[in-house]
């Protein structure tokens, strides 16, 4: 894997017919590239959670993915409401998901903790009223 | 134990997904209706027991490489999920048993087979 592989995805707001498709495409790509299964698993968990948060909380957004020989970097950005208290949001069980979203099985408040646990590096830039940028790195 | 053997012993019905995948070996059982828990806990080859039948279940089963989704208590599976499961090659099975009964019976049988 000499060169860097780049992929970009649109993440539509509140559209569950395509939610998870970006993560699914990236997972398949990593399988094709022969990346170790546990690295693929951690990447899939972290990216899926960030993607779904953009769908549900961020009014939709974008994913930018770069894969090189030794790592994958995933940037998921949205122009949604931002996260008012990031320390609070990072706590297990904290969720503002409305009932309609909870009915589908979301809203455990485990998405951000899952990202933290499974990414090697997690960087979250968020501003109230402006949006959120989540950067996930997993080393192979 | 394969998915097919589990289906026969527990009387599970095939609701969606490719029959060609029924010979896959089951590696474990996970039962939870919270998507983020399932995403983190499901391992490749696991059975996922959940009452949810929405599209996100198909996406998570596919992303985690679960062996199959088992829907308890004869809960009707959303048609769009059946179509998506067929597309994504995700097996969805249906049962009249409760999630607790299914978990107990599956885990007992897997332990016995080991
Ligand atoms: N992209 C985002 N934009 C705005 N708010 C966000 C975003 N991501 C997370 N949040 C806020 O942080 C909270 C916690 O997020 P987290 O992913 O941990 O849980 P959740 O999405 O509510 O539930 P789960 O992920 O377990 O289904 C959310 O409920 C929401 O208030
Ligand atoms: Mg979340």
Image (spheres, helix red, strand yellow):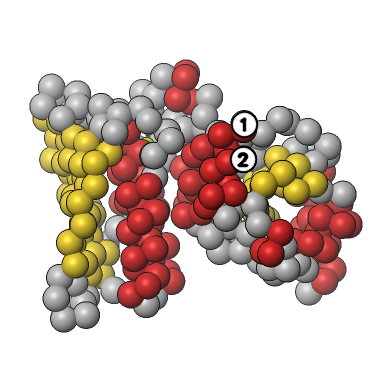
Q: Is residue A30 above or below residue A24?
A: below
Q: Dividing the image into 4 quarters, which one contains the N terminus of chain B? A: bottom right
* Residue A93 appears in the figure: no
Image location of residue B30, percent across then percent down: 64, 51
Residue wearing tag 2: B82
Q: Dividing the image into 4 quarters, which one contains the C terminus of chain B? A: bottom right
* Residue that protrudes farthest toward the bottom in the picture: A2
Q: Which mark is residue B78?
A: 1
- In this rendering, would B77 be left or right of B34? right
Q: Is residue B72 above or below residue B68?
A: above
Q: Nearer the viewer, residue B48 or B21?
A: B21
Image location of residue A128, percent across then percent down: 13, 24
Q: Is residue B1 above or below residue B17?
A: below
Residue at 37%, 30% (x, y): give it.
Answer: A15
**Callout 2: chain:** B
Q: Which mark is residue B104?
A: none
Instruction: Please report contact status of discs 2 and 1: CB closer than 8 Å, yes or no.
Output: yes
Residue at 75%, 48% (x, y): give it.
Answer: B14
**Callout 1: chain:** B
Residue at 58%, 47% (x, y): give it.
Answer: B85
SS class, disc 1 = loop
């Amino acid at each position: 894997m000499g060169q860097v592989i780049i992929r970009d995805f649109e993440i539509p707001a509140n559209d569950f017919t395509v939610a998870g498709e970006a993560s699914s495409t990236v997972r398949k790509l990593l399988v094709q590239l022969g990346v170790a299964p546990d690295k693929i698993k951690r990447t899939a968990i972290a990216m899926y959670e960030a993607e779904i948060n953009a769908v549900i909380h961020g009014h939709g957004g974008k994913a930018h993915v770069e894969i090189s020989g030794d790592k994958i970097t995933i940037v998921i950005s949205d122009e949604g409401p931002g996260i008012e208290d990031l320390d609070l949001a990072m706590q297990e069980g904290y969720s503002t998901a409305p009932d309609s979203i909870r009915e589908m099985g979301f809203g455990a408040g485990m998405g951000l903790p899952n990202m933290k646990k499974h990414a090697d590096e997690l960087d979250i830039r968020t501003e109230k009223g402006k949006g959120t940028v989540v950067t996930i790195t997993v080393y192979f | 134990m394969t998915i097919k053997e589990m289906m026969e012993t527990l009387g599970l019905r095939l609701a969606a997904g490719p029959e060609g995948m029924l010979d896959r070996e089951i590696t474990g059982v996970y039962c939870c209706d919270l998507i983020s828990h399932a995403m983190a806990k499901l391992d490749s080859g696991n059975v996922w027991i959940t009452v949810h039948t929405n599209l996100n279940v198909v996406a998570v089963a596919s992303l985690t490489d679960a062996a199959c989704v088992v829907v308890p208590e004869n809960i009707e599976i959303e048609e769009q999920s059946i179509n998506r499961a067929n597309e994504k090659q995700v097996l969805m099975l249906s049962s009249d048993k409760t999630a607790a009964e299914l978990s107990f019976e599956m885990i007992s049988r897997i332990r016995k087979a080991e």
